[in-house]
Amino acid sequence: MQLWRITTRRYADSAFSGIGNKRVGSRWVPPGLLAVYTSEHPATAVVETLVHLDPHHLAHNHVLIRAELPDDLPFDEVRADSLPADWRTRFEDGELQQVGRDWVARGECALLIVPSAVVPQARNIILNPLHGDMAEMQIHPPEPFDFDGRLFKAL
């Protein structure tokens, strides 16, 4: 299984530590818990990153990192059709964060597959960096990544 993550060069060395989520939390995992957001495809990683960036402050200092895990690892999955109708508009919502809290607490698997709020037909994979299966992850060297300027013309 290939996983993709975009971050700034500054944080490339800690991109898979989960410390960012621990500090500020996210849609699926509350603050205080380590979690790493990745995407199944580089294009999904791009749009997931763009929704959190101010295009006027976008510098050319991002990297794309590919990681690999064995395809046969167990995982939990959240399906969009099992969620409240307004789940895409919720962020840092207690009900959605409970999903991640429970997943981490169970500790049964290292992967939680969730729908992308940006592109619900795409999936993101949240990693529990403390799970033993993470020892099998191979992280490739970061590659420089510049966002195509045409993405910002409509903004």
Image (cartoon, rainbow, N blue to C red):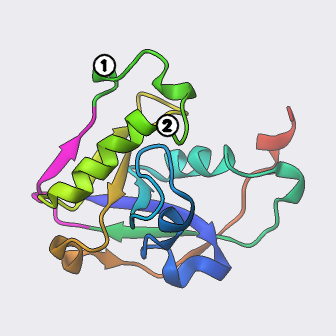
Residue with the most extreme top position: 85
Q: Residue at x 54, y 31 (%)?
A: 90
Image location (x, y in percent) of residue 38: 42, 57
Q: Answer left or right for 44 relative to 80.
A: right
Of residue 30 and residue 13, the one placed in the foreground of this image is 30
Q: Answer left or right for 17 relative to 83.
A: right
Image location (x, y in percent) of residue 20: 53, 67
Numbered badge on residue 93: 2
Image location (x, y in percent) of residue 142: 53, 78
Q: State whether residue 22 is above or below residue 50.
A: below
The quarter of the displayed image where residue 72 is located: bottom left
Q: Which residue is mark 1?
A: 81
Q: Return the disc, 1 or 2, that comes first in the chain's sequence.
A: 1
Q: Are marks 1 and 2 in contact (CB under 8 Å)?
A: no
Circle 1: residue type: Asp
Distance from disc 1 to disc 2, alpha carbons, whole Å, reads 18 Å
Circle 2: residue type: Asp
Magenta span: predominant SS is: loop
Is there any visible trace of residue 31 in the rendered image? Answer: yes
Q: Where does the magenta region start and end? A: 69-78
Numbered badge on residue 118: none
Locate the C terminus and report the quarter of the image it occupies: top right
